[in-house]
Image: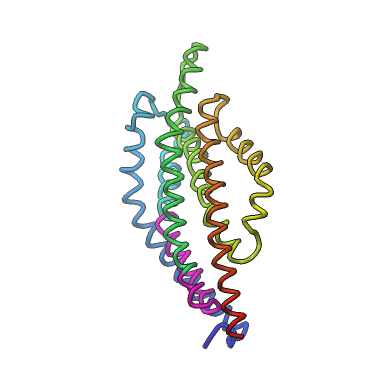
Amino acid sequence: MSHKDMTMFEHIGELRKRLVISVVFFFVATIASFFIAEPLIVYLQKADEAKELTMNAFRLTDPIKIYMQFAFLIAFVMTSPFLLYQLWAFISPGLYEKERKVTLSYIPISVILFISGIAFSYFILFPFVVEFMTRIANRLDINQVIGINEYFQFLFQLTIPFGLLFQLPVIIMFLTRLGIVTPMYLAKVRKYAYFILIVIAAFITPPELLSHMMVTVPLLILYEVSILISRFAYKKAQQAEQILEEEI
């Protein structure tokens, strides 16, 4: 039975089934993440960016709070490909065969881009930010007492947004295939997009030119790559429409 032949109650039942499967998978991933969170937290504390800093817990609940946040974050990353697949499986019966293959390829691309964004932020940007903050504290003769909760909250605030920002090419490709945006429109609003990306970069970096440029340049390149991807997706969509018209 295709999606077009299914009643609304059958659609709801199908959606509920996939939600239940996703929740069960997330629960299993959460249990597995409990065994990964501890060595990951210890590793991050011994990394070059933090090995000269002494971590302190200002509240009794700070260690368990950090442990649980890492566990749920790891579980979410582990579950995200499965969640995306369940979403694809729900909508795929309403797509053409070529559209199914194209949209299915979005899943590994999206996961790779998310991990790439986090890796870029942690290994390239984060060390510069920590060094900048430490240098300012030393110049002002301030003895830094680092709270483990504040340290990892700052790490999350700096890395996770980059993982989301690196989804831009996939989002643009998807919106182009849906006909919501076109490469011509993206090129037309380029200067406004640049301004927004520069403002975002200013919000998530310290007031230092080098750090700001390290964030701004990759974001602008990412936007240009999104335009190129949009052109490819737009061309494919036009060809698909032309083939469909010829068949009719």
With respect to residue 80, does 166 lie above or below?
Answer: above
**Residue drawn at 49 percent across, 76 percent down:** 17
> What residue span does the magenta drawing correspond to?
77-101
Location of the C terminus by quadrant is bottom right
Query: Of residues 17 and 162, which is closer to you in this image?
Result: 162
Magenta-drawn stretch contains 97? yes
Magenta-drawn stretch contains 108? no
With respect to residue 30, does 151 lie above or below?
Answer: above
With respect to residue 51, does 97 lie above or below?
Answer: below
- Measuring from the top left, give residue 129's x and y in whole percent: 48, 28
Q: How is the image coloured?
A: rainbow
Give the number of marks: 0
**Residue drawn at 58 percent across, 88 percent down:** 5
Main SS of residues in magenta: helix
Query: Of residues 63 and 188, which is closer to you in this image?
Result: 188
- Measuring from the top left, give residue 35's x and y in whole percent: 31, 51
Image quadrant assignment for residue 77: bottom left
Image quadrant assignment for residue 206: top right
Q: Is residue 114 left or right of residue 195?
A: left
Q: Is residue 97 left or right of residue 40?
A: right
**Residue drawn at 53 percent across, 44 percent down:** 161
- Measuring from the top left, give residue 199's x and y in whole percent: 64, 36
Q: Is residue 24 left or right of residue 211?
A: left
- Measuring from the top left, give residue 130's x and y in whole percent: 45, 27
With respect to residue 217, does 174 lie above or below?
Answer: below
Query: Of residues 86 and 72, which is closer to you in this image?
Result: 86
